[in-house]
Amino acid sequence: MSNNPLVRFQNVQKSYDGKILVVKDLNLDVEKGEFLTMLGPSGSGKTTCLMMLAGFEPATHGEIYLKDEPINNVPPHKRGIGMVFQNYALFPHMTVAENLAFPLEVRKMSTTERTDRVKRALDMVQLGDFGNRRPAQLSGGQQQRVAVARALVFDPDLVLMDEPLGALDKNLREQMQYEIKHIHENLGVTVVYVTHDQSEALTMSNRIAVFNDGKIQQLAAPDALYERPDNAFVAQFIGENNKLRGIVEDIDDGYCVVKTDTGAMVYSKAVNVTKRGDKSTLSLRPERVVISPEAGAVQNMFEARVLELIYLGDHIRTRISLLGREDFIVKVPNSANHAFMREGEIVTVGWLQEDCRALDA
Ligand SMILES: Nc1ncnc2c1ncn2[C@@H]1O[C@H](COP(=O)(O)OP(=O)(O)O)[C@@H](O)[C@H]1O
Ligand SMILES: [Mg+2]
């Protein structure tokens, strides 16, 4: 917990039916100026958290603070929060400029200041020439940009975005990810963003809170989440991941030996196993597996059969049969040595114990 967060969720719980907690004891600080993403599968409680922060849903238990003030009893329009949702419709009978001026009129801003702010907000999303159009005369991507501009036009400290790019096609979505990221960097506004798309979260965020089952599974920067997942859920949700199952045979000083289903011993980092006999899922990123490692260079070395090679330009996605699994993936960089691999061939593969994480079963 930090000293001076912009937002603090403190022991927040939410139940819609009085029985099931869809948010379970949430404790989360959002720092001023950061881009924090709530990432998780559908139904994990992300939107509910955003709705409580915005003031559209009451918390069942706990308190939410904005700039050190408890806000449970503050109505939404008094919280000064900008919002963008996937289907947050623009007013169809108003022009783009009128849509943007609306939150400023509500705040009783003078006409000159309104005009000035609307212009700046439209320029920011590269729609400076579109102020007189109606929403129906814009593409989906342009409408979404107007929605972003409208959330920012009154200069809020905090903007909430719930899957704002979900309706856009892949290219436009990726372009908008960069645009929103750059707007965030330029304005220094605090953003709480919700998505179920891990690559979107990795691209845009300073920190990511991975949600599952109404709980934060891990809160960390994108690289830390990918490199050092705390548990099996996070490892499988973020990026690609090879899994081997086994039982801890020996454990000492942060490292362990795991006996896999086939009886082979794998040297690994001990992440959330604590003692001999613990069941574990070993997690290993495909790009950390080495084909034909030099003897002694890695702690783990096994024979494998090459099952399938898929040429992807910069790397060869190679599926191998290893330690009883047929779904083991290796990403072989496109360099000279891949030319020697053939489907059906037996190869040696290996990895460092440092690159292998013994997680919960
Ligand atoms: N208004 C509501 N009334 C009753 N149950 C709801 C309501 N909104 C969401 N839920 C339930 O709460 C859980 C979390 O939903 P939600 O916060 O929308 O998750 P997410 O945004 O991660 O997909 C789900 O089981 C969902 O069905
Ligand atoms: Mg949602």
Image: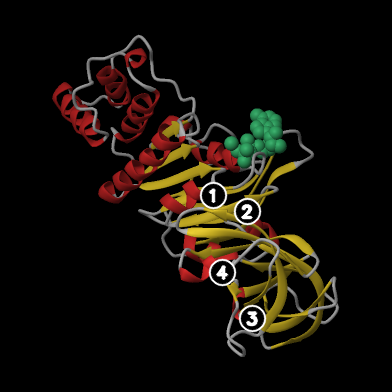
Which residue is nearer to you in this view: 314 or 42? 314
Place of residue 128 in the rendered image (x, y in percent of width and height, measured from the top left): 19, 27
How many numbered dots are placed on residues in this image?
4
Q: Is residue 247 left or right of residue 220?
A: right
Residue beneath the point at 85% across and 72% down: 262
Which residue is nearer to you in this view: 205 or 338? 338
Q: Is residue 345 above or below residue 99?
A: below
Question: Looking at mark 4, is its residue's CB closer than 8 Å to ligand 1?
Answer: no
In this view of the protein, can residue 290 be seen by the observer?
yes
Mark 4 belongs to which amino acid? Phe
Q: Is residue 314 above or below residue 262?
A: above
Q: Is residue 293 left or right of residue 30?
A: right
Q: N-terminal of the two: label 2 or label 1?
A: 1
Q: Which residue is mark 2?
A: 237
Residue beneath the point at 54% across and 63% down: 226
Q: Residues within 10 Å of mark 4 (few under 14, many from 20)?
A: few
Mark 1 belongs to which amino acid? Gln
Q: Which residue is mark 4?
A: 340
Circle 3 SS class: helix
Circle 1 SS class: helix
Q: Quadrant of ligand 1?
A: top right
Q: CA distance from mark 3 to mark 4?
A: 26 Å
Q: Is residue 192 left or right of residue 282?
A: left
Looking at the rendered image, the disc whose residue lies closer to the viewer, 3 or 2, is 3
Q: Which residue is mark 1?
A: 198
Furthest-left residue in this view:
112
Q: CA distance from mark 4 to mark 2?
A: 33 Å
Q: N-terminal of the two: label 3 or label 2?
A: 2
Q: N-terminal of the two: label 3 or label 4?
A: 4
